[in-house]
Image (cartoon, helix red, strand yellow):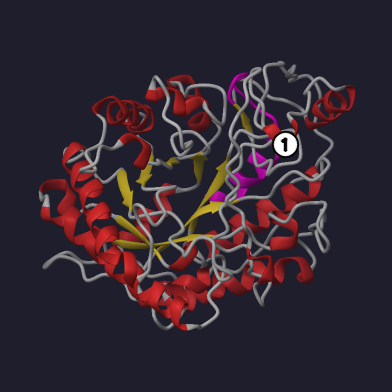
Amino acid sequence: MKKKLIATILAASLALGMLAGCGDTGAVDGENVQTENGSGAGADNEDSSAAEGAGAESSEGAENSESVESSESQESEFEIPEVNIEPYDVPDTEAFAFVHDMKIGWNLGNTFDAFRESPFANELDSETQWVGIATTQEMIDDIQEAGFNSVRIPVTWHPHVDENYKISEVWLNRVQEVVDYAYNNGMYVILNIHHDNSEEFMYPSTEYLEQSVNYITAIWQQLAEHFAEYDEHLIFESMNEPRQVGTAWEWGLNGNESCKDAVACINEINQAFVDTVRATGGNNLNRYLMIPGYDASADGATNAGFVLPTDAEGVENKLIISVHAYTPYNFALQADSESGSSSAFDSDTARFTTDIDNFMDKLYNKFIKEGVPVVIGEFGSRDKNQNIQSRIDHAAYYVAAARARGMTCFWWDNNAFTGKGENFGLYYRRGGYFIFPDIVTALMKYAD
């Protein structure tokens, strides 16, 4: 890393108010920022994997304009735990070698996925709406230098399309520019459809299925053609956490008829995505594609109704299961102010690690043993009053457990550090350094 912020310095800085809290407005650089909190949270789910698929996307606590001093002169007071997990039997195939080579990933969160209902005079301003700063080549260089080999770029498209779903050339070119920051560095890049899950665009129910398929087909037709010359380092992910927004089962299937209908519709939408991309030919014929189930949870992918799309004739083992899991929920995602929330995690204690093992074993048994790779496209743990050592332990155990089963993980980084929101930030974009370097060290120790 070019710069290193020692956690003890950060804690002192926060105590002194160097990082002024943004509060609930998520103010960034003196401007008000619309809050998007997607973690409507599976708190009511029946098991401890409640946060699987709960999107930790919030602008609350996004960075503000005050700088934070960095230091390389003091040693960290934190320890990276020793985690020993016996490797599972992972298929020796090209697809699993591909996922292994992705190593570990980082989400450019709350950036191109940001949106608001009223349009901007300059649509490119939406990139900075939730994080307050535009993405640069130097930022991606820092991410790569830290050891991340993959970047996921969530993109919300609907504010940038016309009535025929044609994507704005200005917006698409800017997305491509940032894709190129990572792609030209030799990194893997995941590009998706993110906050377009609504009745106006994509909504998994029979009532809105035709419209949803039309929207998914239109967007992916354009993206597949635009990025047709990119090699397998560019991965397409059909959509983000598809679910019936606003229902009691938004963050967890309960087996009712609406849930069954949603799962069936997601199967059809995923199939339309695969068919559309493959039909463009060239590199898209063999490009790796990521496929989520309901709310991108492990349960959404392992339930009996979910099926992988049928791939094009002659194309084999090019589909990857996409899962999000902020697990265990009470530690990783639940707000500190809520009943049952915990700020503690110990990688040596089974009661802390069981939830992680259970959901990963479900994925291993359903997919990996059968030759289908899995990528955990979002995970992490929110800061809870500087519980840094617990977050280090969690990061180490989570990645070690995933890699032992042949999976690759992507940390959700929303550039949020202060206030009462979902503070998943690791890399301070304005300063160009990591606020929590020891968490990064823990991730890298077990990513290889």
Residue 362 screen position, x and y as percent: 53, 76
Q: Nearer the viewer, residue 174 or 161?
A: 161
Q: Which of 11 and 224 is in front in this view?
A: 224
Q: Residue at x 17, y 64 (%)?
A: 315
Task: Specify whether 127 is left or right of 284.
Answer: right
Quadrant of residue 305 in the image? bottom left
Count the marks: how many? 1
Quadrant of the image containing the N terminus = top right
Which residue is disc 1 drawn over?
24
Residue 24 screen position, x and y as percent: 72, 36
Residue density around tag 1, few if under 14, some if 14–19, many if 20 or more, within 10 Å: some
Q: Which residue is drawn at 32% across and 60% down?
A: 95
439 part of magenta stretch: yes
Q: Which residue is drawn at 58% across and 38% down?
A: 414
Give above or below for 346 relative to 27: below
Amino acid type assigned to the residue bearing label 1 in the image: Asp
Task: Specify whether 417 is left or right of 386.
Answer: left
424 part of magenta stretch: no
Circle 1 SS class: helix
Q: Residue at x 52, y 39 (%)?
A: 109
Give above or below for 43 relative to 369: above
Task: Tell me which segment is drawn in magenta.
Answer: 429-448
Residue 417 screen position, x and y as percent: 70, 34
Residue 100 screen position, x and y as percent: 42, 54
Visible residue check, residue 40: yes
Give above or below for 172 relative to 347: above
Give above or below for 51 relative to 72: below
Task: Specify whether 125 is left or right of 31.
Answer: left
